[in-house]
Amino acid sequence: MTIANPAELEQSLQPQGWLKYFSFSLDHKVIGIQYLVCGFLFYFIGGALAGVIRTELASPLSDFVRRDTYNEVLTLHGTIMIFLWIVPVVNGAFGNYLIPFYVGARDMAFPRLNAVAFWLIPPAGILLISSYFIAGAASQSGWTAYPPLSLTTPAAGQIVWILSVLLLGGSSIFGGINFIATVLKLRRPGLKMMQLPMFCWAMLGTSILVVLSTPVLAGTLILLSFDIIAHTGFFNPALGGNVVVYQHLFWFYSHPAVYIMVLPAFGLVSEILPVHARKPLFGYTTMVYSIMAIVVLGLIVWAHHMFTSGTPPWMRLFFTIATSFIAVPTGIKFFNWLATLWGGKIALNSAVLFSCAFIFNFVFGGITGVALAQVPFDIHVHDTYFVVAHFHYIVYGGSVFVIFASLYHWYPKFTGRLLNEDLGRLHFLLTFIGFNLCFAPQHWLGLNGMPRRVAEYDPAFTTWNQVSSVGALLMAISTLPLVINVVLTAVSGPLAGDNPWRALTPEWLTTSPPPVENWAGEAPLVTEPYGYGEHTCAMDLGGLSGRDLWSSGKS
Amino acid sequence: MDTRLSQTTSASVVLPASEDESHGSHADHRLFGLATFLVADGMTFAGFFAAYLTFKAVNPLPEGSSYELELLLPSINTVLLLVSSFTFHRAGVACRSGQMTRSQAWLLVTTALGAAFLAGQMVEYFSLPFGLRDNLFASTFYALTGFHGLHVTLGVICILVVYWQARPGGRINAASHFGLEAAELYWHFVDGIWVVLYGILYLL
Ligand code: HEM
Ligand SMILES: [Cu+2]
């Protein structure tokens, strides 16, 4: 047998079995799992840090950790959760695993670049966390690293932080380039853009944001490091510099960053809901346009984070209006999901429960977001716990809930085994209650004036902080059923079969777990990935290696 | 060997040729990927430009500090880079039509022009009346031109590599010239950025 080309030869020389997950593998599926497992490890670290934060805040005095330590913990928590957990998992893990299937390719456009992008992450993460030990002190200036604060806190820790974020940004850009090229260039012949599963559009939109905005953050952090190392004055008012310019540049990345975290989640939910409701995704075309509208609008709303930074009135007006407009495409997506569920034969399994909870939480976070976009309101609650509550409803209630939903949905794909539903529902219940208990009271605290990023607070706020800490404890406990479930299932879970959900999207039209080549034969041409409950489906499922997945995939 | 793997490798033999391309990186895709990367790279410059323009609009020059630029040297440099874009283009045309010696000659000219640009930049740096830390504009000036100069340096190294690869029997020839095209795209990008930089830093 001849091997078709060198890349395949190289692939066949890779280590097999579990060892391959520790190798420089070029297989998009291996890389996806690498991202996923690596992300979860960092999630547990970031979660432990959150535990420290909530323990400290269970009482008004800083009696659990010192105030400096609190700032370090806070900074590490935010940075880990954003750059080492949500961004790599919703993009890197699920993007890498699913996108080649969805476009009908055997791998990403640039497999080697893909592996490089992943392998930048562990060193960056280790660097970040070890800054506490190697630099004597971790960064203390929050995940925003605003100057002049970031210029006056211990320099070594801040520099390590910048280095780590630069590495992670580079990884993200490489990933983004790969996703754009794969979706646009690697589509199977005959597959049109408007036939792609929605997750492809979400990843395309996300990657456009990554490519356009991440480099700006990188440039900004390089200037910041000059200020720290070479004592230039770009952002140092004492040397004639301008801190507001830092904020503009930082938010030019970091508002799109929230969409980099949440657009892929939108895409994943759009894949999960139709399968379990046995209905086509409602409003495909409007979904696509909404994603692209969010991409465009997402790039021109950044200064809503700066209403209290001396922004001139015209700027406030523009950014209020532009931000409020994002509610329109977001609302369209929301109603499309509801319409997808409407009248469906919904299986209330863990994947669906987490997805529905995502819709619920995200609407809540979206409403507080629109409220925050209004200048008079924002001036009142800026830098209070209201903002903390808002963005946790988005990033946790949104993205993290979707990661869990996706884990239950795709675990059988990854491993060929089904996660236990009872443990899954327990996980869901604990997470949902814990999450809302933890973050809902923070709206109230913020409205009453409790500032964010403090280790000590007015004793009047004690009760609701304790409620919040109890919620955090529940969230910590909720990871137990998850971990037990994943480990038990991996060892002795029930076999799932190739397509346990009878799904029509291409990743299910092969074995579970899939072969290295994704399909043993030609890639299926799936022109109606959401053709549930319909009788005429134009699908050419060509060389499906004798397995009649088509009949099992059709309800 | 894993049975699943051998099963699929044998299956891949029957794949149509177009299918297989998705495995390795096809040249077109690589150029597309490079172009996407250059968009990202361009955004880094865009951020720097935006910062510079905002500084200029709102931050007064501190009293007693100087920020004056000569026009002559950078203007010559601009011409050098523009000409080098043209010479690189000629190198590409020659290569695609199989005239490798001629292509190599044009590449050498391009290298020389790039090196001359860098030399000019050095001369300018040493003759300026301000240093990196003197004031905000000085810092931004050095950051921007330095970042661009790094790009030029990298470009010159790439051209030399391409020159080496375009030797008789090298990997670049009329039929296969991805490396040359990539370096050319990159070089045009670096030149384009310089034109914007020249306009904003020197003329405005
Ligand atoms: C529905 C659309 C959204 C609107 C209208 C919105 C609006 C806002 C506004 C105005 C602020 C600034 C509050 C302040 O600092 O005073 C803010 C903060 C924030 N938002 Fe959103 N947002 C939306 C969606 C999102 C999404 C999707 C995410 C993340 C996935 C997110 C994450 C954040 C974060 C992390 C902050 C806090 C940043 C900081 O100051 O540290 N938001 N949002
Ligand atoms: Cu924002």
Image: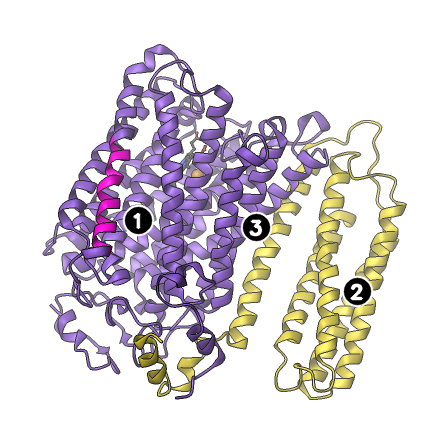
Chain colours: A purple, B yellow
Residue B24 shown left or right of residue A49 in the figure: right
Q: Which residues are magenta?
A: A474-490
Residue under label 2, please give it.
B114
Q: Secondary structure at mark 2?
A: helix
Q: CA distance from mark 3 to mark 2?
A: 25 Å
| Towards the viewer: B4 or A370 | B4
Residue drawn at (43%, 28%) of the image: A375
Displayed quadrant of residue A193: bottom left
The disc placed on residue B108 is none
Instruction: Specify whether residue B193 is painted magenta.
Output: no
Residue A285 visible: yes
* Magenta segment main secondary structure: helix
> Which is in the foreground here, disc 3 or disc 1?
1
What amino acid type should be assigned to the residue bearing mark 2?
A: Gly
| Towards the viewer: A122 or A88 | A122
Residue under label 3, please give it.
A215
Residue under label 1, please give it.
A403
Instruction: Locate residue B68, reporting x and y percent.
Output: 84, 41
The subunit carrying tag 1 is A
Give the quadrant of the N terminus of chain A. bottom left
Q: Secondary structure at mark 1?
A: helix
Residue B113 shown left or right of residue A83 in the figure: right
Instruction: Locate residue B59, reporting x and y percent.
Output: 70, 32
What amino acid type should be assigned to the residue bearing mark 1?
A: Ile
Instruction: Locate residue A370, reporting x and y percent.
Output: 35, 35
Residue drawn at (33%, 15%) of the image: A461
User: Which quadrant of the picture is home to ligand 2?
Assistant: top left
